[in-house]
Image (spheres, rainbow, N blue to C red):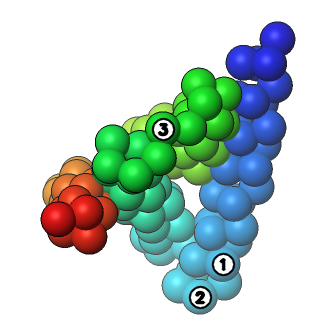
Amino acid sequence: MNTIVAIAMGGALGAVFRHGVNVGAFKLFGDGFPWGTLGVNVIGSFIMGVLIAVFAQYWQPSHGVKLFLITGFLGAFTTFSTFSLDVSALWERGALGATALYVMGSVVLSVGALFLGLMIVRSLAS
């Protein structure tokens, strides 16, 4: 039961944070491009890289803490299903250039952010 509670608590917090980023992005940039989803995916990937490197180099948290942070918080904060829906909406609007930019930007920036997080922590460890 502790496993479920850890995931649920992290998930609730991650979902609230994601909503906050989406609301903030909408207020700042409008609804013409899914900046909020792109932002949470890049930020979440960076945080994932940092956490995985920290877990390997500095801190071996309990299984419950890992589930809270990785499965719960980051699982709810980042969302590939919303990314997929955003791609579909852009495509169906006929915004093919924006669709391509969004897909490439999301993949390249998110994976790059994960590597950056790993690199930063690993450089601090050496």
Observer-nearest residue: 9 or 111?
9
Of the 4 image quadrants, the one containing the C terminus is bottom left
Percent position (x, y) of residue 44?
Answer: 45, 55
Res 28 label: 2
On residue 42, the disc is: none
Dot 2 crowding, Cα within 10 Å, few <14, some 14–19, many 20+? few
Per the model, the C-alpha gap separating discs 2 and 1 is 6 Å
Question: Residue 125 vs residue 73: left or right?
Answer: left
Q: CA distance from mark 3 to mark 1?
A: 34 Å
What SS does tag 2 mark? helix
Disc 2 + disc 3, Cβ < 8 Å: no
User: Which one is closest to the eye, mark 2 or mark 3?
Assistant: 3
Q: Residue at x 67, y 49 (%)?
A: 14
| Quadrant of the rendered image containing residue 73 | top right
Q: Which residue is mark 1?
A: 24
Q: Residue at x 66, y 28 (%)?
A: 64
The image quarter containing residue 106 is bottom left
Q: Nearer the viewer, mark 3 or mark 1?
A: 3
Q: Nearer the viewer, residue 62 or 38?
A: 62
Residue 60, labelled with which disc?
3
Residue 50 versus residue 32 in the image, above or below:
above
Q: Position of residue 69 (x, y in %)?
A: 59, 42
